[in-house]
Image (tube, grey):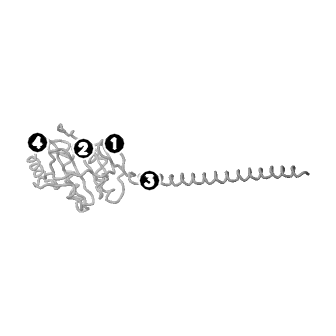
Amino acid sequence: MSRASVLAMKHRLDQSVLVRYDWHVRRERDRSMIQRMFGSFRRRAVAILAVATLASSLVENTFAAKFNKVVKIGQKAPSWKELIGIDDKKHSLEDWKSKKLVVVVFTCNHCPVAQAYEKRLIEFTKQYKSKGVAVVAISVSQFEADSFENMKQHAEKHKFNFPYLYDKTQKSARKWGVTRTPQVFVLDQKRNFAYMGAVDDNMNRSKVTKNYLRDAVDATLSGKEPEIRESRQIGCAIDYQAR
C-alpha cells in the first residue's frame, strides 16, 4: 500500500473519530441542558405548589355567603366602634375581646318579627353567659319608634339582659351586609364569621324545628364548624338612608 493511501486512510479514520467525538460532546451538552431545564422547572413547580398550598390554607374556611352579598363565612368580622348604648356609654366590638364567642343581633323596636324573638334572645343570653358567650344587639333603624330614647324604654320594659346599641350612621349594618331585623351573626374566638342568618326557622316558637343560632354556638364552642353556617334571614327590611 502506497504512502498516499495510508495517509488517506488515516485522514478518514481521524475524521470519523472527530465526528463521533463531536456527536458525543453535543449529546452530553444537550443532556446537561435538559437536566438544567428540568431542574429549573421542578423548582418552579415546587414554588408554585407551595404558594398554592399557602393560599389554600388561608381561604379553606372562607366561602361566599348565599344570602349575604357583603361578607363571607369564615372572614374576619369588620369592626365597629363608638356606638352609643342604652347605658349611655360608647362601645366597640373590642369591648368583648375576652369572650369566647360574640353573638351580634341587628334588631329594632318596631318590627313584629324582631319582637317575637326578644324572649328567645333573653333566654339564650341567660343560658350561654356562663359559657363565655356575649350577646350584643344593635339597631340602625331611623324610625321614630326606634329612636334612642325609645330604645331605652323598650329595653327596660322587656328586661333586656344584653347591651343594646344604636348606630345612627348605619355603617355597622352596611359593612356586615345586614338586610333584615332580626339578623344574627356568630363570631368565633378569632372574630371570624362562624354563622349568619336567622335565629331559628320559624317566627312561631311552637313550630320551630331548627335552632340555627344555638346549634351554631354549640358547635363553635366545641371547636367544630356548625353543620349549618348560614340561613336566610327573616324579618323586617332595613330602611337604609341615602348616603
Q: CA distance from mark 1 to mark 2?
A: 13 Å
Q: Nearer the viewer, mark 1 or mark 3?
A: 3
Q: Nearer the viewer, mark 3 or mark 4?
A: 3
Q: CA distance from mark 2 to mark 4?
A: 20 Å
Where is residue 114 drawn, in percent x and y? Answer: 19, 45
Q: Is residue 47 left or right of residue 102?
A: right
Decide which of tag 2 and tag 4 comes sooner along the chain: 4
Which residue appears farthest toward the front when viewing the image? 3
Q: Which residue is mark 4?
A: 145
Decide which of tag 1 and tag 3 comes sooner along the chain: 3
Q: CA distance from mark 1 to mark 3?
A: 28 Å
Q: Which residue is mark 3?
A: 51
Q: Which residue is mark 1?
A: 66
Numbered marks: total: 4
Contact between labelled residues 3 and 2, with CB atoms less than 8 Å apart: no
Q: Is residue 112 left or right of residue 225?
A: left
